[in-house]
Amino acid sequence: MAEVVRDLGVSEGTLGSWVVRARKAGGDGTLEESGRDELRRPRQKNAELLKDNAQLVMERDVLKRCMVLWVK
């Protein structure tokens, strides 16, 4: 439980209350298709942002090199 709390960045009390509510709501712990879609969208967006960030870092490095050459 401590590892999950650290990963999620929440307190143990918060996680505990989520577990209690989930158990009261029932279910077998599997996600419906809509739940899987909800998780898939942020993961795809994160992948896009990481790709964009890598591109921007590369462009910044090129500009730094150009600036050094221009100053010389």
Image (cartoon, rainbow, N blue to C red):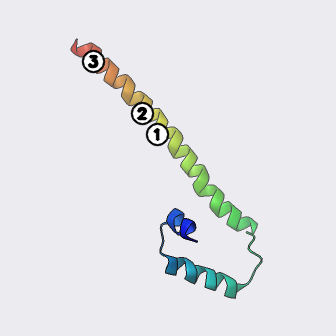
Residue drawn at (28%, 14%), measured in percent from left and top? 69
Extreme residue in the left direction: 71
Relative horizontal placement of residue 66, taking residue 24 as reference (left or right): left
Residue type of the residue flagged with mark 3 = Val
Label 1 vs label 2: CA separation?
A: 6 Å
From the top left corner, tell me how far across and down residue 38 is, in percent. 64, 63
Q: Residues within 10 Å of mark 2 (few under 14, many from 20)?
A: few
> In which quadrant is the N terminus drawn?
bottom right
- Whether 18 is drawn above or below 5: the answer is below
Extreme residue in the top direction: 72
Label 2 vs label 3: CA separation?
A: 17 Å
Q: Which picture quadrant has residue 25?
A: bottom right
Residue drawn at (62%, 85%), measured in percent from left and top? 20
Q: Residues within 10 Å of mark 3 (few under 14, many from 20)?
A: few
The image's mark for residue 53 is 1
Kind of element beneath mark 3: helix
Q: What residue is pinned by disc 3?
A: 68
Label 3 vs label 1: CA separation?
A: 23 Å
Q: What residue is pinned by disc 2?
A: 57
Q: Residues within 10 Å of mark 1 (few under 14, many from 20)?
A: few
Residue type of the residue flagged with mark 1 = Asn
Residue type of the residue flagged with mark 2 = Val
Kind of element beneath mark 1: helix
Extreme residue in the front direction: 2
Residue drawn at (22%, 11%), measured in percent from left and top? 72
Pick the front one: 29 or 4 = 4
User: Could you tell which of marks 3 and 1 lies nearer the N-terminus?
Assistant: 1
- Determine whether label 2 and label 3 are within 8 Å by CB: no
The image's mark for residue 43 is none
Residue drawn at (50%, 65%), measured in percent from left and top? 6
- Whether 2 is drawn above or below 46: the answer is below
